[in-house]
Amino acid sequence: MSSSEMPCRSLGKSGIQISTLSLGGWLTFGEHVRQEDTIAVILKSAFEAGVNFFDFADVYGRGACEEAVRPALCSLPRHEIVVSSKVFFPMSDDVNDRGLSRKHIMESVDKSLRRLGMDYLDIYFCHRFDERTPVEETARAMDDLVHRGKILYWGTSQWTGVQLREVHELCRRMNLYSPQVEQPQYNLLARYAFETDVQPAATGLGMGLVTWSPLSMGILSGKYDQGMPPDSRMAKEHWLHKGHLTEDNLSKVRRFKKIADAVGCTRSQLAIARLMSQPGISSVILGATRLEQLRENLGAMQVKMTPQVHQQIDDLFPCQPPPNDNVT
Ligand SMILES: NC(=O)c1ccc[n+]([C@@H]2O[C@H](COP(=O)([O-])OP(=O)(O)OC[C@H]3O[C@@H](n4cnc5c(N)ncnc54)[C@H](OP(=O)(O)O)[C@@H]3O)[C@@H](O)[C@H]2O)c1
């Protein structure tokens, strides 16, 4: 597809526009995909197809992801791309090398910028809520980073509706830059927290939503129909099986094929297209270990979602609480 076919959407009430489909680097770049030329081809192809938002984190490969994407990212026009990173998860055994304290945020942003070879981040996410740090300390640190020009916007990831409302109220009272975007998990196998809590809260606060794991880490593509392909994510990351690679999920994904076949697209494309049609979403963050996967997934832009297809998908994958913890 060409870049003219990739519409951009507002990031909530902010002025910035990001591509409806974006690309992230969790478990792929610098980990399962290490060849520099493969990484470059995937990132550049995404950019040429109109993707302008690229999502990374310090903890992805403990710095390896940010380093692995640097050559390819630096070859793209900086002003045309929106690059994010994240802070929260431990980067070493050191007691302060984790969380959302002022110290860890200030030190982490410089390390991410060095690894990415950039002067500023467009978006800096608090990768989780930190129970041990006062929210005011975190919000002030993020506000300072905006004033220093090291980040343009800040965001949250996997925060609850209550936590989002609280931080917005605090920022309003203290006249601080508030988080402009939340990054929650959202896919057909994990709808409940997003649709019943995060989406109404974030949208009400004027925040954008950029959602992760649209294929439930590849499961919705149908690649696990006949067992475990040896080079797949689930073959390499056994810790992800629990709560995801269940017989119930696999059986639904097999039945999903009939709906996708009738529409004339793949299950990956239909799963992604369904998310794009959900109100409030600024961008769906894709993951890909191969160029063919990226190309297929970008084809979701061409899928025509009728109300009947929408209903069939919702009947097969109802919005219900997960039987156990379904969040990585
Ligand atoms: N904020 C957070 O806490 C958080 C958490 C997770 C992810 N994220 C962000 O969201 C991004 C996307 O998440 P994700 O990688 O889990 O997305 P996903 O789309 O659910 O899974 C992507 C993986 O599925 C497989 N795949 C993708 N397309 C396929 C296709 N068409 N056919 C067959 N297999 C396919 C590939 O893995 P294999 O080829 O290895 O099987 C690929 O790496 C991440 O890169 C990251 O930026 C954020």
Image (tube, rainbow, N blue to C red):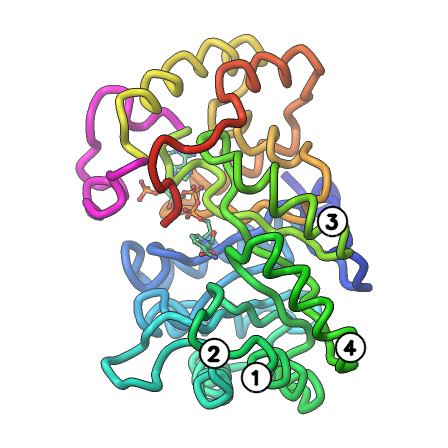
Badge 3: few (under 14), some or many (20 or more) residues near its Cα, within 10 Å? some
Q: Which residue is tagged 4?
A: 173
Could you give the CA–CA distance between mark 2 and mark 1, rounded to whole angstroms?
A: 7 Å
Q: What span is in magenta?
A: 221-243
Residue type at mark 1: give it. Answer: Glu
Horizontal arrangement in the rendering, residue 305 relative to residue 246 (left or right): right
Q: Which mark is residue 96?
A: none
The CA span between labels 3 and 1 is 25 Å
In the structure shown, which secondary structural element does the residue marked by tag 1 occupy? helix
Kindly state the secondary structure of the residue where label 4 is placed.
helix
Name the residue carrying label 3. 203
In 3D space, how far apart are the residues under numbered discs 2 and 3 (Cα atoms)? 26 Å
Whether tag 2 and tag 4 are in contact, CB under 8 A, the answer is: no
- Residues at badges 1 and 4 in contact (C-beta under 8 Å)? no
Q: Position of residue 229 (x, y in %)?
A: 21, 32
Instruction: Work out whether residue 172 or residue 47 is closer to the camera in this orientation and state it.
Output: 172
> Would you say residue 142 sits in the magenta stretch?
no
Label 3 or label 1, whichever lies nearer to me, is 1
